[in-house]
Image: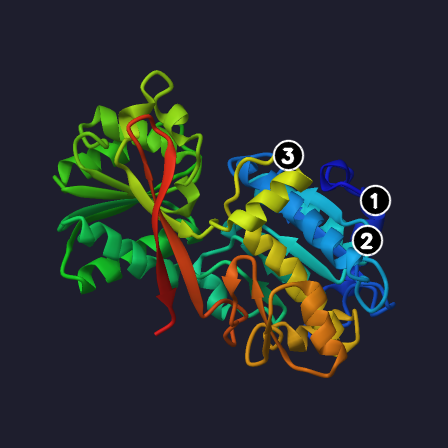
């Protein structure tokens, strides 16, 4: 079934059933979650259908669907097709995300894809991993997850911000900037990337003249904009999601916009719609703004996803979500079990130290021969470290041209020291 058809049809159960399931499964960090291993790999997702990150929903949700289609066309997992995926909205709201996670878990899934936002994953990770169910996010970048006590059940194909920060600092200082202001949303993503980038900038000899957080739910960002302007930087970094458009508007009014100083962003601001959101009548206002984001540049995969789901235009984190699904399926094949308490042991192993393969079908053929595999995904080599995340990653350096069009300038590599 086409993903665009099934992702809207989440399974809703009664509140009584939800509570019963949560009580029955909660707190078991040793596995045995999901259906306990019935020979069928059941998947769910908690991804943004509404809220500030709704633009990331279609590429991620459709990537789940494309991965499932590819796996099923290759014979499925353990000889059985992956059934229709159970999905629900994270919505950018903690309460909604928690309810969605419980709803998905109540259907007996073996693994959950998502959430997209680091803050939403932090809201649901204890429920998912505590139920002995594998969780894999294709877009969580907050450094918090690297040493989070998840019982070994949380994974991500998106690189940690500890990898992105030195790359971002290199881009900023490489443009000749030495006095940097940082404005970041007040959550784990914002604070974590702000601190990591500040450290990287200072290690490269730059001065961080101010680093301030703001309430992302605020309706007015004049205060933080005035603080940035008053520090008289020659460049400013904005760590934001969609509200970053309003932050940039306030900075323009304060004399610290893209036409005044160098402006930089991160993955949360990488959007083809940003110019129109900041200045509908003058999209060139953000011309020259730069930023970094985990790479979305895979022309072959982009073409395949657009053919599968023509309405998808944004590709950010789409390859990483595809790799979450494929890695889970390969781990189940490698252990011969759909029980997350069993296949969790191979989530890291199928991404490193084996024969290279780049698709579920090719990797499965090697596994069937008894060969250890090293799955290199559509987002690049994964090479999971012990924390269940990439040890190396490629980042796009993006910019906006004179017409406000999003462009990729180059790619840079980041790795664990």
Q: Are marks 1 and 2 in contact (CB under 8 Å)?
A: yes
Judging by the rendered image, the residue that carries numbered circle 3 is: 310
Q: Residue at x 45, y 62 (%)?
A: 144
- Could you tell me if residue 124 is visible in this image? no
The residue lying toward the viewer, choosing from 56 and 12, is 56
Q: Residues within 10 Å of mark 1 (few under 14, many from 20)?
A: few
The residue lying toward the viewer, choosing from 222 and 350, is 350
Q: Position of residue 151 (x, y in %)?
A: 61, 73
Query: Of helix, strand and loop, which one carries label 3?
Result: loop
Q: Is residue 214 above or below residue 189?
A: above
Between tags 3 and 1, which lies in front? 3
Q: Is residue 253 above or below residue 316?
A: above
Q: Is residue 99 left or right of residue 117?
A: right
Q: Residue at x 59, y 51 (%)?
A: 115
Residue 13's tag is 1
Q: Position of residue 216 (x, y in %)?
A: 41, 38
Residue 182's tag is none
Q: Position of residue 72 (x, y in %)?
A: 79, 57
């Amino acid at each position: 079934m086409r993903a665009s058809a099934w992702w809207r049809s989440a399974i809703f159960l009664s509140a009584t059933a939800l509570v019963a399931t949560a009580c029955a499964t909660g707190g078991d960090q040793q596995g045995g979650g999901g259906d306990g291993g019935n020979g069928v790999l059941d998947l769910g997702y908690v991804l943004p259908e509404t809220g500030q990150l709704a633009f990331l929903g279609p590429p991620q949700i459709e990537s789940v669907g494309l991965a499932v289609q590819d796996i099923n066309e290759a014979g499925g997992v353990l000889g059985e097709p992956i059934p229709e995926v159970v999905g629900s909205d994270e919505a950018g709201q903690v309460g909604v995300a928690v309810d969605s996670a419980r709803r998905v878990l109540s259907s007996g899934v073996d693994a959950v894809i998502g959430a997209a936002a680091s803050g939403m994953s932090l809201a649901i990770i204890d429920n998912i991993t505590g139920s002995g169910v594998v969780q894999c996010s294709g877009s969580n970048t907050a450094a918090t997850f690297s040493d989070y006590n998840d019982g070994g059940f949380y994974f991500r194909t998106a690189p940690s911000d500890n990898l992105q920060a030195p790359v971002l600092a290199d881009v900023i200082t490489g443009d000749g900037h030495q006095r940097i202001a940082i404005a970041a949303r007040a959550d784990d993503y914002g604070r974590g990337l702000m601190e990591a980038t500040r450290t990287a900038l200072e290690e490269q000899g730059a001065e961080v003249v101010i680093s301030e957080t703001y309430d992302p739910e605020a309706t007015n960002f004049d205060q933080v904009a005035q603080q940035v302007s008053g520090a008289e930087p020659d460049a400013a970094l904005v760590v934001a999601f969609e509200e970053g458009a309003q932050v940039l508007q306030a900075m323009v009014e304060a004399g610290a916009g893209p036409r005044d100083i160098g402006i930089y962003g991160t993955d949360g601001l990488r959007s083809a719609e940003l110019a129109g959101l900041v200045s509908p009548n003058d999209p060139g206002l953000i011309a020259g703004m730069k930023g970094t984001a985990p790479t979305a540049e895979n022309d072959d995969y982009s073409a395949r996803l657009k053919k599968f789901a023509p309405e998808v235009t944004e590709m950010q984190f789409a390859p990483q979500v595809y790799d979450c699904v494929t890695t889970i399926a390969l781990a189940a094949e490698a252990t011969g079990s759909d029980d997350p308490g069993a296949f969790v042991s191979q989530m890291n192993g199928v991404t490193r130290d084996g024969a290279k393969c780049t698709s579920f079908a090719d990797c499965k053929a090697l596994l069937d021969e008894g060969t250890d595999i090293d799955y290199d995904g559509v987002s690049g080599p994964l090479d999971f470290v012990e924390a269940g995340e990439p040890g190396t990653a490629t980042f796009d350096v993006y910019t906006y041209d004179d017409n406000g069009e999003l462009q990729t300038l180059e790619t840079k590599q980041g790795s664990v020291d």
